[in-house]
Image: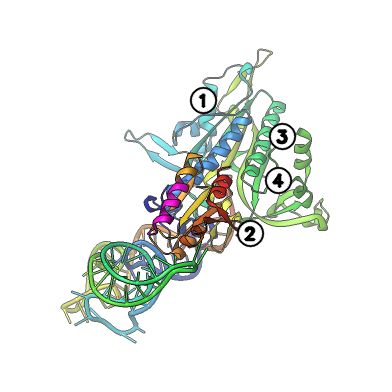
Amino acid sequence: MRLSSLFMPTLKENPADAQVTSHRLMLRAGLIRQTSAGIYIWLPMGLRVLRKIEQIVREEQDRAGAQEILMPTIQPAELWQESGRYEAYGKEMLRITDRHDREMLYGPTNEEMVTDLFRSNIKSYKDLPLMLYHIQWKFRDEIRPRFGIMRGREFLMKDNYSFDLNEEAGRISYNKMYVAYLRTFARLGLVAIPVRADTGAIGGDLSHEFQILAETGESTLYYDKAIEDFDLASLTGDIDADTIEKLQNLYAMEEEKHDADNCPVAPENLRRAKGIEVGHIFFFGTKYSESMNARVTGPDGNLVPVEMGSYGVGVSRLVGALIEANHDENGIIWPEVVAPYKVGLINLRIKDEACTAACGDIYQRLTDKSVDVLYDDRDMGAGGKFADMDLSGLPWQLIVGPRGLKNGLVELKNRATGDRQELTLEDAINMLGA
RNA sequence: CGGGGAGUGGCGCAGCCUGGUAGCGCACCUGUUUUGGGUACAGGGGGUCGCAGGUUCAAAUCCUGUCUCCCCGACCA
C-alpha cells in the first residue's frame, strides 16, 4: 500500500477527550474515529489489526475443535423472556422494536440464541460434544463507556458455547478453552494471567478471567509468582493436563476477593499487578438448558439437559490492550503477528529520481514476496515521515535516502528496539522477505 | 445514576467576567524555499461560536431550558 493514497488520518496533537494511552494513540495513528460514546468507526489501519487478531483467535478456536458459525446481532425478545434474562439484564440491553412492534434486542451475548439453535437440531448424546463459536459485534449499553475501544458499548467479541452430556465432559470442554486461551494470548505476545472469577450474571460455578498485565489496567490482581514460571507469553505448544492442573491450582485473585490475612501464598511470593480483562470463560452446567429445555437422549434412553459453558474473548478490546502493553513515547509498537503492515518503507526524497526508483523496486520485490509493505511515498519532509512511522508502530522501517543510496546502502530500523543497521538493498530485501 | 469538567473551522486552544456579529497555533490549498527527526517565507480556503428559547438597537459573550462528550465511582469481553 502506498501511504499517499491510504486513508490514515494522523494527528499531531492529542485529542482532548482521549486520556488513556491506547485511546490517544489509536486516534492519533488514525486507527479509529468516534461517532458516539463508546461507538467507533474502524479505519483501514485499525481494521487490519482487528482482522489479524480475529484470525489468531479463530485459528485457536478451530484448533480446539470448535466450529465457527455466525449468529445475527439482532435477536428476538422471546428467547430472553424464556431464559428469564429479558428483565434481569436491565438497562444494559439495547431494546428495539421493529415495524410490527415486535420486541427485539441488539445482542449483548448469545447464550439464548445458541441454546435455541442447539435444542432444535441436536437430539442425541451421539452428537456431543459440540462447541460452536462466532465472532460478532455485541452491544452493551454500559453505564459509562470509557478508555476508547477498551470499554466501548459496541465491541467485537468471540463467544464460544460448549455442549456436553455430563459435567465431567463439560469440564473437559472447559479446559480445552482454557488451553486455547493460553495459546491465543501467548501468540499475541501477551502475558495473560488466568484469575479465578465469579460467574456474575451468566451464572454457574467455574470461571476464569484472563487478565493482561498492564499499568493502565482496570483491575488489581494478586497472584502467586510461580505463575510467572510458566512463561505465559510463550506457552503456544501443546499443554498437557498436568500443566493445566498446576496452573489452575496456583493462587490468582482480584483485589476485591483477595484476603491478605488468609492468603495461601507467602507474602514474598505474592505479586500485585494491574490487569486488563481480555477473556472470560464459564462453565455453568444446565442453567440455560433447563430453563430453555435443551435436552438430549442419553445412552440409557433418558432425556437429560445438556451441560454448557461459554467462553468470550474481547477481540476489539485486545487492540487497545496490545497497545497498552506495547508502546513508547513516540507511538505504538506492534508485535509482528498483528501489525497492520510488517514494513514501513520510507522514501526520504520523493523528488530524487534514483531514490524513488530504488524504493519502487524494493516495494515491488517485497510485495512479490508477500511481505506487507506500507510505502511512504508522500512528498514531504523526513521528520514528518519518521514521526508518522514511529506513531504507526510498524515493526520494521526501511529508510531509503539519497545519502545512503550513493553507497548502495539502505537503513533498517527495528521499531521495538530502535536498533538500526545499514544494509545493501539486496540484503535488506532478503532479510525482510525471509 | 452520584460527583467533577467541557462544547468556538479537521486537531489543540484564546475570546465570554466588562455584549458591538470571530482570533491564534497546527493541519489543508498555491508558489518559492528547504530536505536524514515535524524547514522557512508569502498568499489563500474553511467556522457564525452544541441546540432551542429569552433579554437587548445589538448575543460566542447575559438569562432559561435542553442535548452531547470527557474524567472519578458501582457494572462488564
Q: Nearer the viewer, mark 1 or mark 2?
A: 2
Looking at numbered disc 4 in the image, what kind of residue is underneath it? Answer: Leu
What chain is tagged by disc 3? A
Q: Nearer the viewer, mark 1 or mark 3?
A: 3
Q: Residue at x 64, y 37 (%)?
A: A282
Residue A352, magenta (yes or no): yes
Q: Nearer the viewer, mark 4 or mark 1?
A: 4
Indicate the secondary structure of the residue bearing disc 1. Answer: helix
Report which residue position mark 1 lands on.
A117
C-alpha distance separating marks 1 and 2: 41 Å
Residue A238 — which label?
A: 3
What chain is tagged by disc 4? A
Q: Main secondary structure of the magenta part?
A: helix
Marks 4 and 3: same chain? yes
What chain is tagged by disc 2? A
Of residues A154 and A30, the one nearer the viewer is A30
Q: Position of residue A235 (x, y in %)?
A: 70, 41
Looking at numbered disc 1 in the image, what kind of residue is underneath it? Answer: Leu
State which tag comes first along the sequence, 1 or 2.
1
Verify CB contact (< 8 Å) between mark 1 and mark 2. no
Q: Which range is magenta?
A: A351-363
Q: How many marks?
A: 4
Verify CB contact (< 8 Å) between mark 4 and mark 3. no
